[in-house]
Amino acid sequence: MTDLLEQLRAAVGDAHVLTDPEDVAAYVVDWTGVHTGRALAVVRPGSTDEVAAVVRACRGARAPIVPQGGNTGLVGGGVPDGSGSQVVLSLGRMRTVRAVDPVAGTVTVDAGVVLADVQAAAEAAGRLFPMSLGSEGSCTIGGNLATNAGGTAVLRYGMTRELVLGLEVVLPDGRVWDGLRGLRKDNTGYDLTQLFVGSEGTLGVITGAVLRLFPATPRHATAWVAVPDVAAAVALLAVAQERAGAHLTTFEIANRQALDLVLAHLPGAVDPLDEPSDWYVLVELAATEADHGLDDTLEAVLGEAVETGLATDAAIAGSRAQRSALWSLREGISEVQKVEGATLKHDVTLPIADLAAWTDAMGPRLQQILPGVRPVTYGHVGDGNLHYNLNAPVGRDDDLRAAAAQLSTAIYDAVAAADGSISAEHGLGRTKAAAAASYKSDVEVDLMWAVKRALDPEGLMNPGVLVPD
């Protein structure tokens, strides 16, 4: 592979082809620490032309390519396998915001631009880019697009695929498809943009994107609400939708176990309510500067909820600091789980009407498999997405690892029985590719492979990810 390394250095410069183990280390392990691989090299191109040159060189040497953004993924989709033969293609140097058009409502960016920087560019133009994730300070737009990321504003604005208008993609043969058109209407053939969204780097390398912007929403009304159970949370969602309409932006859920972990491990975290509850929801309304009455609307929602028994208590943010404190209770959950010990993560979607029955049945089933296992449940009620994570029984990390396959199978079987999905917003990566295929029909799997073979006949783009080997 010496010739390949020389070609890669010629394409991007010596300083941007990393082979030293110390330099490579951060690129070959995922955020969870579960997936660790080996790489032939980590290559850091600075432009689309350089990406194309790298892809052509790898194709000539038949070296597999693993595209990587901010490396914040949770399913191993952005790290190499253990063979040491794969080239990690990091887009981290491609961080240019190419153009902002507030009138058309678009922003055009390199794939390596960090999500928070896209949000800031939109804000500077008086607009809003609504995608919001816990990792927004480090995840990149390319990774968001490749996994069809979700977040806390999906209820109002939709998933990533609903926020993108056009893409620029380097194909597996090194050609560049320039689809950077910011048109809202274009019925001239197959929707190639949507083909690449959610493809996890298996069909090509996304190098640029035209994204949708929206009117800024500087007004917010936010509350942390205690609810007796998931059924009450779902019913409260209906009340909030009816009363708040399009202003309802966020409707998150968390169980007491999740809150207890945040209170124990997140510095400065404080329970905003006097009495504990089994479940909580974080509700937020957002509006433009011209819209008034958000606080009154939220108070009306919560008043009805308390009167009808859907809520037992609530804390309404009265300032930016209080709003930030409430959001930290929700956003801190994923991080503090790592502190608590071994964790088994699940990112599932269910029909909203089935969330309560599914959750009620799942807990006892898992206790039969591993007594003492601690479900840390949180997610997005408005789109049916639960992060149904499991912490090990106290002091028994090895027991969780030993039972992991059985626990996951029980969860996935129950999701499939409810016509849900085993991956809502994290992608399939290496973790879930085989499991997802086992729950799909033969026709669906064949169609996925037909697309993969048509665009990547040599199978060099992120092999082992999304579609199982």
Image (cartoon, rainbow, N blue to C red):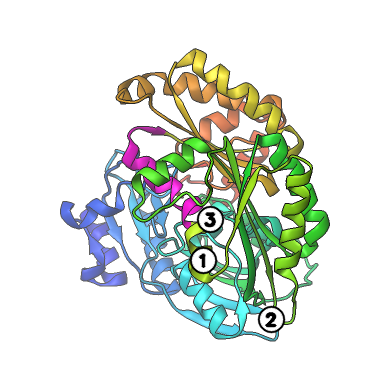
What residue lies at 57% left-to-right and 79% top-to-bottom?
Answer: 122
Return the residue at label 1.
175
User: What x and y, as percent, mark residue 219?
Assistant: 65, 74
For residue 146, the mark is 3
From what the image shows, is residue 181 above or below residue 151?
below
Q: Decide which of tag 1 and tag 2 comes sooner along the chain.
A: 1
Foreground mark, 1 or 2, reads 2
Q: Decide which of tag 3 and tag 2 comes sooner along the chain.
A: 3
Task: Give the residue type that dot 2 points to.
Answer: Glu
Q: Is residue 342 magenta?
A: yes
Task: Give the residue type that dot 1 points to.
Answer: Arg
Q: Quadrant of residue 49?
A: bottom left
Foreground mark, 3 or 2, reads 2
What residue lies at 54% left-to-right and 70% top-to-bottom?
Answer: 319
User: What x and y, as percent, mark residue 273?
Assistant: 53, 48
Circle 3 crowding by C-alpha within 10 Å: few under 14, some 14–19, many from 20 = many
What residue lies at 51% left-to-right and 66% top-to-bottom?
Answer: 175
Q: Residue 173, can we see it?
A: no
Task: Give the residue type that dot 3 points to.
Answer: Ala
Foreground mark, 1 or 3, reads 3
- Magenta span: 328-343
**CA distance for labels 1 and 2:** 45 Å
Callout 1 touching callout 2 (CB < 8 Å): no
From what the image shows, is residue 166 above or below residue 272?
below
**CA distance for labels 3 and 2:** 34 Å
Return the residue at label 2.
289
Q: Is the magenta stretch mostly helix, strand or loop?
A: helix
Q: Does the magenta stretch include residue 333?
A: yes
Q: What element carries label 1?
A: loop
Judge left or right: residue 211 versus residue 118.
Answer: right
Residue toward you, 140 or 174:
140
Q: Residue 159, can we see it?
A: yes
